[in-house]
Image: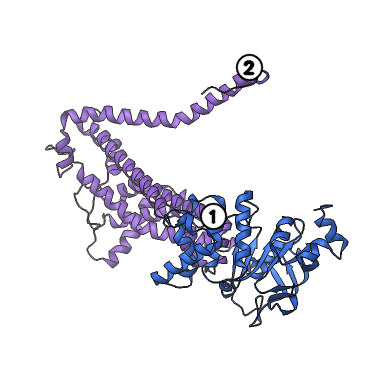
């Protein structure tokens, strides 16, 4: 589309040049994240290709064993996927209700002073190194669970799952709380003016108004839980098992990658290449959850 | 005008209001509110007219540290709205409010209107359906929305959203309806619609309206109160206030000498 500009403005050549330059710099900054992502995907695809030259995709998806270290090596990704899905599911089953209720409390019920005390503590919790949480799971949570559930092995998925849940609560609570606080006061006033209570206002007006942000918080939490490495590497046992039972020990995709990257397999072997295939699966899982979140968010918006 | 026989719906008695931080925004306000009449509050920005309006449904309770002194008494039951033992939620069930900017909820058109009934615990779908239809008709928006009751309310135009907010406030059969500059965010045609609607609503309930627009006050209201710096300067029949104000300040404001 041609835009008509007066001669007087068009002659400001220098200004246009600077504008263009700035625009280009901004574009570059915005593109850097996109390029990095594309580069990662390319490397994963390229390295996985070597892997899939030796292992058929069918075996990769249907074999029920993952034993790259054994003489009789099997490369079935499902045991790692089941470990990943189970620990993440335990974490989210714990973190989503607690985090959401916490966010509602902080945003709609807590006094200014309570909020200003609790939020920094939550954000501090986000900064605790995950390896600390790993030992927390292994040395505190699992022994406690063993008292409740006799026969629970030292390495299991329940303990790390709960601990990952604790880890992601601050994300859910803090991002959801931001979304709720961003709901304009006029909307709350509208609800109160109709004779609604605080609780009714929080549940029926503020939460639906903030639902996009809340779902964004959940997606962030899912990605964190699926991608969490140290907690499961330490406390879940590093035993690839095709099981969804929280009592069993298991390995997740990330735990496996860390195990291999730490040097259990020679560089360049098929076993080594397998971490790229595993990484690709992890990335596809995260992508799937992001897309799922995107569409749920759309659907939620239409439902009102 | 036969003001003598018009019954009182509410009145404020020596009302003072102090904001958190100590600012005394209202100073000894006395004003009657006649039943099924429109009373307009006019005055320059910051004179306290919105503050006064928001005392009626205790909106100031939402923010900590605010303080009321004096009374707002509702008739015929003589309830002091500001009384210590009075639940603000009970008050808001009887006095509804329409805001300056349309503020529909992130729900469907239907659910917006049903909101007040739902928070009152109404579950019967037939009753809610009937009330929603009646309220939307009462707010002169039924014909525009009857085929898309389950669309998101945000998809309506500004004027339609404001009429929806009026329908929402109507659905619970309030005795008094408060309007806080209801047309200041609307274009002239939407404004005319809302004004017409308000004069129709006068048959059903008592209206208190804050307006910046003096022509609007003159067009729609039966009584007008002029406020300045937290005080009630003059109150009377709209016709008299606009043709023959007793105070110099009122005349100056109405004729546009200041404000």
The chain letter of the blue chain reads B
Tell me the quadrant of the picture where the C terminus of chain A can be found.
bottom left
Is A260 located above or below residue B226 in the figure? above
Instruction: Give the left or right position of residue A283, taking residue A75 as reference.
Output: right
Instruction: Give the left or right position of residue A271, taking residue B1 as reference.
Output: left
Identify the residue at horizontal 52%, vertical 24% (top origin): A24
Label 1, label 2: how many angstroms apart (C-alpha)? 47 Å
The chain letter of the purple chain reads A
Please tell me which residue lies in front, A214 or B220: B220
The disc label shown at residue A290, or none: none
Instruction: Give the left or right position of residue A60, taking residue B156 as reference.
Output: left
- Identify the residue under disc 1: B161
Chain under callout 1: B
Identify the residue at horizontal 58%, vertical 73% (top origin): B94
Instruction: Give the left or right position of residue B65, taking residue A247 as reference.
Output: right
- Identify the residue under disc 2: A13
Q: Tag 2's secondary structure? A: helix
| Labels 1 and 2 share a subunit | no
Image coordinates for residue A282, horizontal then vertical, percent: 30, 40
Image coordinates for residue B175, horizontal then vertical, percent: 60, 73
């Amino acid at each position: 589309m041609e835009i008509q500009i007066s001669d007087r403005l068009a002659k400001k050549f220098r200004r246009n040049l600077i504008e263009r330059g700035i625009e280009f710099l901004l574009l570059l900054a915005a593109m850097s994240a996109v390029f990095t992502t594309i580069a990662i995907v390319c490397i994963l695809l390229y390295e996985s290709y070597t892997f899939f030259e030796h292992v058929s995709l069918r075996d990769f998806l249907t074999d029920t064993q993952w034993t790259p270290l054994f003489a009789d090596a099997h490369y079935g990704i499902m045991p790692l996927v089941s470990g990943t899905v189970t620990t993440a599911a335990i974490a989210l089953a714990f973190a989503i209700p607690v985090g959401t209720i916490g966010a509602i409390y902080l945003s709609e019920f807590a006094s200014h002073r309570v909020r200003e005390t609790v939020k920094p503590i939550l954000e501090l919790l986000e900064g605790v190194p995950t390896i600390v949480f790993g030992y927390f799971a292994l040395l505190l949570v699992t022994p406690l669970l063993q008292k409740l559930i006799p026969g629970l092995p030292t390495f299991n998925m329940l303990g790390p799952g709960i601990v990952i849940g604790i880890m992601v609560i601050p994300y859910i609570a803090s991002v959801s709380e931001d979304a709720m606080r961003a709901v304009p006061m006029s909307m709350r006033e509208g609800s109160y003016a109709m004779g609604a209570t605080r609780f009714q206002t929080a549940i029926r007006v503020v939460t639906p108004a903030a639902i996009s942000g809340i779902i964004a918080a959940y997606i962030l939490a899912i990605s964190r839980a699926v991608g969490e490495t140290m907690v499961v590497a330490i406390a879940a046992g590093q035993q690839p098992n095709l099981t969804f039972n929280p009592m069993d020990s298991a390995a997740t995709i990330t735990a496996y990658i860390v195990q291999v990257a730490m040097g259990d397999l020679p560089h360049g072997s098929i076993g080594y290449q397998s971490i790229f295939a595993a990484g690709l699966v992890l990335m596809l899982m995260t992508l799937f959850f992001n897309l799922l979140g995107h569409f749920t968010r759309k659907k939620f918006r239409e439902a009102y | 005008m036969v003001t003598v026989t018009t019954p009182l719906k509410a009145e404020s008695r020596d009302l003072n209001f102090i904001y958190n931080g100590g600012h005394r925004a209202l100073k000894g306000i006395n004003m009657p509110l006649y039943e099924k009449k429109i009373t307009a509050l006019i005055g320059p920005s910051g004179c306290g007219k919105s503050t006064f309006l928001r005392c009626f449904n205790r909106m100031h309770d939402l923010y900590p540290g605010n303080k009321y002194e004096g009374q707002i008494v509702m008739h015929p039951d003589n309830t002091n709205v500001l009384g210590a033992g009075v639940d603000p939620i009970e008050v808001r069930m009887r006095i509804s409010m329409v805001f300056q900017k349309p503020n529909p909820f992130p729900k469907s058109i239907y659910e917006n209107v049903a909101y007040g009934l739902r928070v009152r615990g109404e579950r019967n779908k037939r009753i809610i359906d009937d009330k929603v239809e009646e309220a939307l008709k009462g707010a002169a928006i039924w014909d525009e929305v009857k085929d898309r009751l389950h669309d998101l309310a945000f998809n309506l135009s500004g004027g339609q959203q404001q009429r929806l907010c009026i329908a929402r406030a109507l659905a619970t059969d309030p005795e008094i309806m408060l309007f806080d500059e209801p047309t200041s965010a609307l274009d002239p045609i939407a404004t005319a619609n809302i004004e017409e609607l308000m004069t129709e609503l006068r048959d059903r309930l008592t209206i208190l309206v804050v307006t910046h627009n003096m022509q609007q006050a003159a067009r729609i209201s039966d009584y007008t109160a002029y406020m300045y710096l937290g005080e009630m300067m003059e109150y009377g029949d709209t016709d008299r206030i606009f043709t023959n104000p007793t105070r110099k300040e009122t005349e100056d404001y109405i004729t546009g000498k200041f404000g």
